[in-house]
Each structure stands twice: as C-alpha cells, then as structure tokens.
Amino acid sequence: MSSRFRPAVRALLGLVAAAALVGACDRELRDFGSSAPEAGPTIQTTSLTPGPGGQVPPDPRGEIYEKSAAHVSEGGRLFRWYNCNGCHSNGGGGMGPALIDDEWRYGSSIEQIYGTIAEGRPNGMPSFRGKATDEQIWELAAYVRSLGGFTPQASSSRNDEIRSTPPRNQVTPPKPSAEGGASVQGTAP
Amino acid sequence: MRRPASAAAALLLCGCTGVQTPLDPAGEQAASIHTIWTLMLWVCGFFYVLVIAGLVWAIWRNRRVAGGAPQASTHDPGMERGLAIWSAMIFVGLTVLATWSFFVDRSLASTHEQNALHLRVTGYQWWWKVEYQEGPHPWWFETANEIHLPVGKTARIELESGDVIHSFWVPNLSGKMDLIPGRHNVLDVTPTRVGVYRGQCAEFCGFQHAHMALTVIVEPQARFDAWRLHQLQPASTPATPDAQFGQQVFQSRACGMCHTIAGTDAGGRMAPNLTHIASRPTIAAGTMPMSKGALAGWISDPQGIKPGSKMPDVPLTTTESSAVVAYLSSLQ
C-alpha cells in the first residue's frame, strides 16, 4: 500500500522543498519617505571636543537604517550629492579624516555618526541639521558605517564608480581592540 | 473616396492624432519613419489579404471535390507557376521593405546640418535636464523637463545620462534614442509644425520610469527668441512678504542643497533648475500640471505622489510650506 504512494509522497516533498527554496528569495521591503520610522528618542550627541564623554543611548532607527541595503545605497548617493567626498574623498580622507580606517574621534556607532553629521564637529565638519532631512542623515550615517565595513550584509558588492578600495561588503571590519575608543562611547583614542 | 478601404483606414487612423503619437508626425525625422510605417502596413496588409484569400479558396475547393477521390499528381503546371509567382512576390516585397528601411535609417543617422540649434539633454532618475548650449558661454542656460524648439530649424540634441540608461522619445518629432552612461549620443530633430508635444522615457529606468515625461513646445522663431531671452534672466525678486519668506526658507532649508535658482544663494546642482519653474507647463517631470495646488502637494508629500523619487519629504510647517509655494509660483 505504502509503496504505491511513495512516488506521490516523494513528489510532494520535492514540491515543498522547492516552495521553501523560493520562499528564501524574499527581498527586503523598501519604505519611502514618510513611511520610514519617524520619531525616536532625541539623539544626545557626543561632546564637541574629543575626549571622555557621556554614553550615547542606542536608537532603534539606527539598526533599521544600517541593515537596509536601500537606505545604505541612498546614503551613498547623498554622500556624493552633498559633496562629502569633497573632504572625505570616498572614505579615504583628504581635507577631512578617513572613514575607512579604524580611528573614530567622535565614536563609530551609528548614533554617534548621526550626531557628527547633524551637529558638525570643530575644525571643518559642517552641521547638516535642517539642511538635510533626518532620514537623509540616517542614510548617510548608515553609508559611512558601511564604508568602514561594519555592515557587510547590507552593503553592495559593487562600487558605483572606480575606486582603489575593495567592495564595501569585503572590507575587514575594525578589530575590537581598535574599536576600543568607540566602545567607551564618546571617547577618542 | 474612390478607394473605400483606404478611406476606412484613414478614418481609423484619425483616432491616432495627439500630443504623443508616431502616426501624426510633426517633424522631418518622424515623417520619414511614418512613411516606412505606412509602407510596411500596405505591403504586409497586401500579403495578409492574399494568404487569407488563398486559405478561403483552399477550403472552398476541398469541399467542392469532397465527393471524388483525392487526385495525387506529381506534375501540376498550374501549381508550379503559382508557387513561382508567389516566391517572386515575397522576394520583391522583402526587398522593397529592406531597401526603404535602409535608406530611411541612413537619412536619420546622417547629421549633415551645419547651423543646428545645439542643446544637451541629460536623463536622471526621474527627470530631464535640458541645457541650451548655443553661442558664447554667457548665453547658455539650463531648464528642466521642457524643450522649446523653433519651427523649421534642426536641433542637434546631445543625449547623456547621469545615472542609468534612459531613452529619449518624442514620437511626434523623431524616433527614440538611448541615453547611456558614459556615452554621448546625438539626435537631430527638425520640427515642421507648431504645437505642443509630449516625450517620455522609453527605457525602464526604475520606480518612477512612468513619471519621466517632458514637454516639447515647437513655436515660431520670434517666440522662441523671446522665451530664450527670458530664460537667460535670473529669477525675479519676490515682491510679496509671503514670497520673500518663502525665498528665505528655500535657501536656509534642504531645498537649496539640490536645486538652483539663478540669482539667489540656492545653487545645488543635483535636481531640476527652478529659476523659471512657474513658466513650465508641468512639475515633477510631467507628473502633474503646473498649479499652486500641485506645487503645495508636491512640496509637502513628494514620496506620496511619486514614491521613490529623489525629492525627500522635507519637514516644513504649514506657514513655511505655503510661503515656498508662493515664492516658487512667482518665478515666472
């Protein structure tokens, strides 16, 4: 009896396996503008000068933005549109500090990078609060994180233009010891 | 009226006139494409009728001889002659189509006009940047999503892309041509009839591909010159207090990061130039007709109107938003 049904069962199992396989092809959903997460806790920025500072509380929006490939790539577009590479030169640094090394004067968490972009920093970094929308600043921060190799799963395997650096999903993230400065949040090496 | 079939066909094609159709050519290039379209219609129509007639005849003939046994014959002079004529007709038909198509293609590809109006169109997601590059540098100017052309004069349009592949297609004036990143394509357009035509991106380019249109206004030379002189002027100074506040908001908030308004501090190079936005027929690349209401809607909720568009939802208060609308709609 069972041998008569065996081929049917096998076919059914195959079908279920195929369905599971197709189910894995899920793509991330994109949220546009107002549907993106809006209000969160107010970002406490790290102190204006490098050195020991207070803790920056984690923001739920940070994780949403840095895990979304769409937001990270929009951040890359804004990085060029707002001429961030004029000083940071595609992350390699020039007039401004490099963003692909493991040295972060004002911290490397996405909340701290958000604060740096929104408030500006002494000696050249302008404040983008009001000039860029909140969503755009989060996207920029997420992109800057991806430059440092912190979020390989959301980064593109291909750069938009010719660069000497490896693709962002192959950048080696900074070593924990080197990140020490940032883990004591707000302090600089 | 002598040929009822052609009269009926002409009547049918009357439904195809409009601002965006290749069947109502208003340019030399579109007209020559239209001739080949018509020729193909007649040649293919002729053969279609012939094949259907042959089929009907075969069915009818089979029924007539149904009573007798089928006659298998290896030698049928009538059939042989018929097949020879049929092959010759196919050969002639294909040759006529191929030759005509070759010459039309050559004539479209040759850019022999020497004193053409020179402009550059750059495609972005999802709008068109239009730069008139005629004469010395101070005479150059930039607009967006609208092209004005003098009637009867050839315009040489350089096509470039700022991001992905787009395709420039104004069916009433010419065939389509792709805008390819890193390449420099050239399209000659010679409008022959005054009118307003609509062009559209003809290569899928992302979320808002369908909302990437442009308006082409073909006008007499004198009106074109007047328009051009006006475009060379910087933006008008806002007169009302509302509009003045709007200008301040525009310059101090996110607007000026991407948009340029000539004569003001707003100098972003990434989004459409808004110096004379109120004189344009549409906003957001043909998404909505130009009006204060549409401007207000667009400024307060661009992602609701055109999801995925590069214009962000800028948080403005109602006062700020209506002031910006007052300012922009004063930019004639």
Image: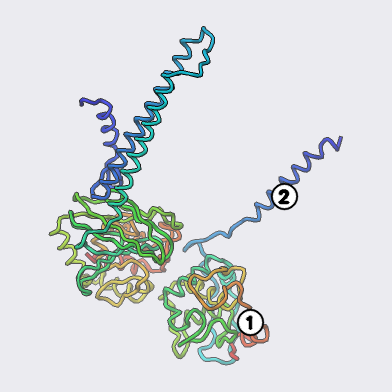
Label 2, label 1: how far apart the Cα atoms are? 39 Å
Q: Residue B229: x, y in percent?
A: 17, 67
Instruction: Read off the chain for label 1.
Output: A
Which amino acid type is shown beneath numbered disc 1?
Pro
Left or right, B109 with reference to A82: left
Checking the image for residue A124, the label placed there is none
Q: Residue B16: x, y in percent?
A: 29, 39
Quadrant for the N terminus of chain B in the image: top left
User: What residue occupies the far left of the structure in this picture?
Assistant: B222
Checking the image for residue A17, the label placed there is 2
Q: Nearer the viewer, residue B20 or B88?
A: B88
The local secondary structure at tag 1 comes to loop
Count up the numbered dots.
2
Residue drawn at point x = 85 percent, y = 37 percent? A3
The local secondary structure at tag 2 comes to helix
Quadrant for the C terminus of chain B in the image: bottom left
The local crowd at label 2, few if under 14, some if 14 to 19, many if 20 or more residues have their Cα within 10 Å, is: few
Checking the image for residue A174, the label placed there is 1
Q: Earlier in the sequence, mark 2 or mark 1?
A: 2
Tell me, yes or no, if residue B79 can be seen here: yes
